[in-house]
Structure formats: structure tokens, C-alpha cells
Image (cartoon, rainbow, N blue to C red):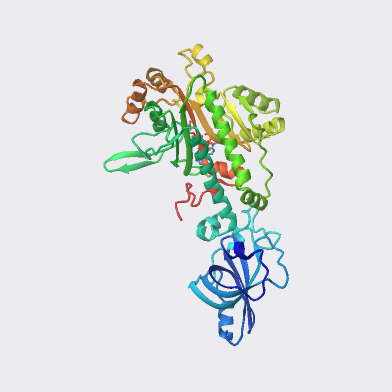
């Protein structure tokens, strides 16, 4: 990395260097002079190719017409530029090129310019718009159709460094607390998640399903005395909708743990986990975060004070919405606009873009969810889905990033809930029998949660679409590239 090595040195005519770089720009100034800009990772270096006794005019012409994105090997002499450079990415270095070899010549007409990919996508209804610097604001589909060029942009390098950073922060926090990483199957004999739609695949002469979550298996691992497990893996959902926050394949960050007395031990751990991720991003990925937020003109993410994550009972959330004029029943699920509204109300009241909504109504949660103690006391067979449950969602900027719950750990209770659920499932079916049996052979009380990785990245950075946080996103209309 020339920039790192020589940035703070002063010299004239030297040292001689040889390096590999990408041509970011090349132009012929005159028959005797060409200017090039090379990039090395995210740094840019300017270069001069001048005809001399040892460098022919033909060579000058060749260098000045190398297509953008070509890979070259450069021999040259380092100089400080005559005028100091006033750019954050272009380094204060200049190369006087002596030799130039092409390793890979790019096409001269690229379907997408990397410099254009450095900007934001258009807002809804904003077509043919241009940036302040005159470059076009390229549509999301054009970028995704030419994703390998799009991904060359520093903007995407920042987004995907952050994405891996979240996985590292998630892992390091949980490892420190005695969690073990697990790898559960993605080919299943039965859907793993009530509610959401499942992809069916041909499995020799049987039917199989792509995992909608590691839910059943992470719980079976608790029954297998692992006590604290975590998993990062792909999740498949046949959601036939084109929203800005749903993918058909995304990355799940899952955890599950046994607790001592109360599932809130787990909620507290999950809150601390999220704060560890946010603080880690804020310190370790400040440069990347600031860059992306500047491009998308997004406000700072407002974090709560340590130990003061707003945690609202579902009924309190409903009350806040009603006080603000929303019409909503006590046990209704929040619509997407209502979730956003509540996010804004929580921000106003508690000054935090991150909060937890606890005790969701039992009727709108999956079959494995533990009914609250009060719900169990007041159980009435004619209304088996009434009341609240020990379950929670976590929100960032008014959008859901995590769902979790205390789970039913008693086989008889679980079988009853499976049959009484709003969408009943058969506990004796091939795909679910072993899951139910796991609790027959002993299992501690446990709770956990599943986080959508692309959603965290999207909402941390304030990106307008979850596809921007997936390298090669999959949605109902896109299976390639
Ligand atoms: P998941 O359902 O996978 O947990 P989610 O963010 O979709 O994640 P839900 O609680 O299912 O969360 O949905 C919250 C709201 O989001 C729903 O009330 C609905 O308005 C909207 N929604 C959920 N799924 C879809 C979908 N596939 N397409 C469009 N809107 C959806
Ligand atoms: P849930 O279905 O809420 O819960 O999924 C967990 C989290 O995954 C993310 N997510 C998605 N991200 C992108 N595209 C999608 N289509 C999509 N669907 C969901 C969201 C969501 O909060 N088994 C439970 C978790 C648990 O209880 O441990 C589950 O899967 O961020």
C-alpha cells in the first residue's frame, strides 16, 4: 500500500516503485503527456506518463487510453505533486510512470461506472436525477444487474466490512459468555417456523423444505444440555412480496440459552448484545459508517444509555399509539406504518432509536411461544389463544430486527399449544415428532432470539433498501446474478 508507506515522507525523484493497481481514470493530455489515476484498495494515486528518451509517444498514447477498471502493473518514480491534493481519497503522491503492463484489459464501455455506484439509489418516484457532482443517480436494479461492478465502489466495501463486523461482534460477545457455535440443517422434513412461507424442494423421491430458521434445532440443542448456543447461517423464506425489507434468502444471527428464573435474564443479555454491536460499529467502523451515512444523508443512530434500553410492555406500545391517534385493538399485530410510528414515538419520549417491545399477544406468535404466567392462570379452553406471551421483538429506527421468546419446554404443554394454535400443527407428524420428543427426555427453561443481519446493517446505516445489504440479493424477481 503506497499511500500508507509514503504518505508522510518528503522526497523528490524517488524512490522507484513497482506495484499492481486498477486504472480508475486515464486521459491523453497531449501527444507527449497522459494522466492516469490508479487505485489501490480504497486509496487513489495520480500518475503522469510523459514522453522522454526512454518513453515513446506511442507508450504515452497507449497509457492514456487504457480503459477504466483495467488491471495494470506500474513501474515508476514517486514524487510529491506540485499542488497539494485537496481530496480525501486521492493521496498526496504522484507517480512518474516509466513502464506499464496490462494484466487484464477491461471493456471500454462498462454497463455501470464505478464512480456512479459511489452514490445513493434514487428515492421513490425520483427518476433520472443527478448528483451534485453531475453524476447520474443509478437505479437499484441497474446496480444489482451489474453487481460485480457495483461492488467495486468504496461505498459497498464499507457496507460489507460493516456486515462482517456485525457477525464478529455478535460472535465475540456470545463466546465470552460461554456460548457454543452450532451448524444446524438447512434441508428439513417440515417447515421450521409457523407463520412464514416455506420453499419446498425435491429431495430424491420425498419432499423437503429449506429452513426458515434454525428454531427447532437450536431448542433441541438446549435439550441436549448445550445450554447456550449460537448460529450464523442462511435463512430461506418464500415471501412473495417486494418490500424494501424482505429478502427470500437472508442471514440469521440466532441464539438460544437456558435461564435460571426468568426469561428477562435472556432479554437483558440480548439488549447487551445489541449495545455491544452498536458500540463496536461506532468505534471500530466509524469511518465506514460515516461514509455511507453521508452518501445517504442519514442521521446519527441514537443509542440509549447503557442499561437503559427502553423496554415496553405490548399494552404500553398500543397505548402510546392510541394516544397519538392510531386506531388499533389491544391484541392486534402492528402494521408496518404503526411499527414506524411507534419507533418515532419511542424516539421522542426516550431519545433512543433502539427499543424492545415485550409481551406480544399469544395469538400472533408461533406455536413454540410460552404463554405469560397470567395467561396460563386464566386459561380458558374456549379461547386458548387469548392473552399475552413471554415474547419480544427488538426494533431499530422503527423496524423489526429481532424476534424472540421464552419457549415451551414441557412436551405435554407443547403438544397442546400446537393443536390449539391459530394455525395448528400436528405434533405427531414426521417433521415435528423428534422436536416434541426432545422435551419428553428433559429440557431446562430456555429463551432466545433470531436477528436479521441484513436488517441490522440496513438500519444502522439508514439504507433505504435491505437489498443494499446483501451481496447478491434474492427476492421473488431475482435469482441472478
Ligand atoms: P417476520 O415476519 O419474518 O418475523 P417481519 O418484519 O416481516 O419479520 P412480522 O411481524 O411478520 O415481521 O410483520 C410485521 C408487519 O410487516 C406485518 O404486520 C405486515 O404489515 C408487514 N409484513 C410482514 N411480512 C410481510 C411481507 N412478506 N410482505 C409485506 N409486508 C409484510
Ligand atoms: P422471525 O421470523 O421474526 O423470527 O425472524 C427473525 C428476524 O429475521 C429477520 N427477517 C428477515 N430479514 C430479511 N428478509 C426477510 N424476509 C426476513 N424475515 C425475517 C428480521 C426478523 O426479526 N425463530 C424466530 C426467532 C426466534 O424466536 O428465535 C424467527 O425466525 O430481522
**Relative horizontal placement of residue 72, taking residue 37 as reference (left or right):** left
Q: Say left or right for 400 vs 11.
A: left
The residue at 72%/73% (across/down) is 82
Q: Position of residue 232 (x, y in %)?
A: 46, 40
Q: In which quarter of the image is residue 224?
A: top left
305 sits to left or right of 178: right
Instruction: Identify which residue, 418 or 9, lies in the foreground.
Output: 9
**In this view, 237 is above or below 42:** above
* Image position of 377 with respect to 317: above or below: above
> With respect to residue 141, does 439 lie above or below?
above
Identify which residue is drawn at 56% across, 61% down. 41
Q: Can the viewer see residue 327?
A: yes
Tell which of 188 and 152 is nearer to you.
152
Q: Position of residue 455 (x, y in %)?
A: 55, 42
**Residue 328 in sight here:** no
Q: Residue 431's x, y, as percent?
A: 33, 31
Give the side of residue 178 with respect to residue 341, left or right: left
Amino acid at each position: 500500500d503506497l499511500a500508507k508507506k509514503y504518505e508522510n515522507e518528503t522526497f523528490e525523484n524517488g524512490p522507484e516503485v513497482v506495484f499492481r493497481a486498477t486504472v480508475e481514470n486515464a486521459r491523453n493530455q497531449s501527444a507527449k503527456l497522459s494522466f492516469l489515476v490508479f487505485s489501490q484498495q480504497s486509496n487513489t494515486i495520480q500518475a503522469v506518463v510523459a514522453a522522454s528518451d526512454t518513453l515513446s509517444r506511442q507508450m504515452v498514447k497507449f497509457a492514456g487510453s487504457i480503459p477504466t477498471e483495467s488491471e495494470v502493473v506500474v513501474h515508476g518514480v514517486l514524487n510529491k505533486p506540485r499542488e497539494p491534493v485537496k481530496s480525501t481519497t486521492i493521496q498526496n503522491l504522484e507517480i512518474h510512470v516509466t513502464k506499464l503492463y496490462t494484466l487484464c484489459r477491461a471493456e471500454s464501455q462498462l454497463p455501470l461506472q464505478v464512480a456512479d455506484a459511489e452514490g445513493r439509489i434514487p428515492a421513490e418516484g425520483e427518476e433520472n436525477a443527478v448528483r451534485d457532482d453531475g453524476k447520474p443517480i443509478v437505479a437499484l436494479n441497474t446496480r444489482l444487474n451489474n453487481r460485480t461492478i457495483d461492488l467495486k465502489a468504496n461505498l459497498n466495501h464499507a457496507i460489507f466490512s460493516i456486515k462482517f463486523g456485525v457477525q464478529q461482534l455478535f460472535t465475540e460477545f456470545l463466546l465470552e459468555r460461554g456460548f457454543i457455535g452450532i451448524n444446524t440443517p438447512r434441508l428439513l422434513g417440515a417447515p421450521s417456523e409457523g407463520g412464514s412461507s416455506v420453499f419446498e424442494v425435491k429431495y430424491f423421491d420425498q419432499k423437503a423444505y429449506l429452513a426458515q430458521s434454525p428454531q427447532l434445532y437450536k431448542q433441541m440443542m438446549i435439550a441436549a444440555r448445550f445450554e447456550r448456543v449460537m448460529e450464523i447461517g442462511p435463512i430461506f423464506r418464500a415471501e412473495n412480496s417486494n418490500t424494501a425489507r424482505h429478502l427470500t434468502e437472508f442471514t440469521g444471527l440466532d441464539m438460544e440459552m437456558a435461564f435460571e428464573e426468568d426469561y428477562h435474564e435472556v432479554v437483558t443479555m440480548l439488549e447487551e448484545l445489541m449495545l455491544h454491536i452498536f458500540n463496536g460499529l461506532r468505534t471500530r467502523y466509524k469511518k465506514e459508517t460515516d461514509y455511507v451515512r453521508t452518501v445517504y444523508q442519514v442521521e446519527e443512530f441514537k443509542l440509549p444509555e447503557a442499561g437503559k434500553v427502553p423496554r415496553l410492555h405490548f399494552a404500553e406500545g398500543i397505548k402510546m399509539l392510541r394516544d397519538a391517534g392510531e386506531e388499533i385493538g389491544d391484541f392486534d399485530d402492528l402494521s408496518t406504518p404503526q411499527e414506524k410510528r411507534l419507533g418515532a414515538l419511542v424516539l421522542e419520549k426516550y431519545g433512543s432509536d433502539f427499543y424492545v417491545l415485550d409481551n406480544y399477544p399469544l395469538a400472533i406468535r408461533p406455536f413454540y411461544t410460552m404463554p405469560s404466567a397470567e395467561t396460563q392462570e386464566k386459561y380458558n379452553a374456549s379461547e386458548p389463544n387469548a392473552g399475552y406471551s413471554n415474547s419480544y421483538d427488538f426494533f431499530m429506527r422503527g423496524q423489526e430486527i429481532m424476534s424472540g421468546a421464552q419457549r415451551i419446554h414441557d412436551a405435554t404443554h407443547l403438544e397442546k399449544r400446537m393443536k390449539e394454535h391459530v394455525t395448528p400443527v400436528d405434533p405427531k407428524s414426521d417433521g415435528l415428532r423428534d422436536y416434541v420428543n426432545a422435551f419428553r427426555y428433559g429440557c431446562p427453561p430456555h429463551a432466545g432470539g433470531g436477528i436479521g443481519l441484513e436488517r441490522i446493517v440496513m438500519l444502522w446505516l439508514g439504507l433505504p433498501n435491505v437489498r443494499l445489504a446483501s451481496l447478491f440479493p434474492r427476492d421473488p424477481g431475482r435469482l441472478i446474478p
